[in-house]
Amino acid sequence: MKKILAVALAVVMMFSVSVLAFAANPITQDTDQTETIDVYTVVDAADDTYTVTVPASVAIPWNNDGASSGTADYTVSCNLVAGSTLQVAAAANDGGVMNTDPVGDDTLTFALTGTTEAQSFSGYVTSQTVDLDATVSSFEGVAVGEYTGTMTYTVTYTAV
Amino acid sequence: MKKVLSVALALVMLFAVCVPAFASQTITQPGQTPVDVVTLTTDINGNPAANFTVTIPATVSIPWYGTTGGDSINWSYTSQLNIGEQLQISLDKTSGNLTNGTDNLPYTLSGDAADAAYVTTDEVESANCSTAIAVTGWDDVPVGAYTDTVTFTVEVV
């Protein structure tokens, strides 16, 4: 009985040694001397990265003769797994009204011009700049001064 | 000392190169980022935007014995000044003499800018103004061309 058990265990051990060889494509003297192995990366939405660069402020030069604009461009870089998306939107706050500090009798109004609709990004994007301006259409009848309004950039990220 | 100065100057130069990068901000998380939009008080060429124009006649012609209803210096202005500023227009005299050699025709000025300096009431303003000129002594002097100069002074106050 003991001898039978010993032989059985030895056979089991031999089979376990063989398992690794069963999972591969063996190269022997009778086969091609090369074999291919598939190597692939495993990705996850946790690996997604992105950067949206916006101006610290937007300055609009005065124009006594008509409209004037300040640059509000933003730049996007991202590296997202397939299925993840990034959306950037910009909007003028409070209808674009601009006041002095302290608030006086005169106001100005700015509007966003250029690529004003929300932009979506996916995959690998390197420093893509979106053209956007803040424009005052008329400075007529308004005392010259620093009028301030606010715009908001909204970044929305959706993981796969 | 020279090495310390050269290192310091190199650092100053590097910081100057970095300045444009500080004019933006980066977003790496979802959410809303407010940004101020501000008008400058200079135009796109960097020139001050505040402006005004005062239009005065080069000459004023008065017929002998004057115009029925009176003679006047008609002038106008338009302004778009900085917040808090006003335009002030004044004359160098309220009376004088129109002269022709040794002969004089006295005159007085009244009305806008004559009785007192004319000061606008708003930064953005335009108006037509009139300064009356009354000449006397027509019968005391030979008929001829008598002249004098009235100087307008415009200031932003």
Image (cartoon, rainbow, N blue to C red):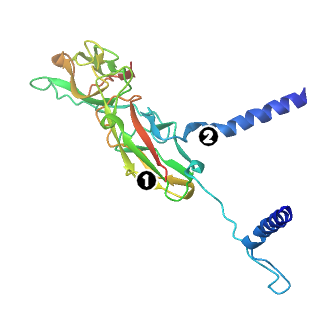
Q: Quadrant of the N terminus of chain B?
A: top right
Which numbered disc, 2 or 1, marks the residue closer to the eye? 1
Q: Amino acid at mark 2?
A: Ala
Q: Residue at x 28, y 22 (%)?
A: B122
Q: Position of residue A131 (x, y in %)?
A: 46, 52
Which residue matches tag 2?
A: B21
Q: Residue at x 57, y 37 (%)?
A: B23
Q: Position of residue A133 (x, y in %)?
A: 42, 46
Q: Is residue A31 left or right of residue A115?
A: right
Q: Quadrant of residue A95?
A: top left
Mark identifier at residue A119: 1
Q: Quadrant of residue B148?
A: top left
Vertical placement of residue A138 versus B137, above or below: below
Callout 1: chain: A
Q: Quadrant of residue B123?
A: top left
Callout 2: chain: B
Q: Are marks 2 and 1 on the same chain?
A: no
Q: Residue at x 57, y 50 (%)?
A: A48
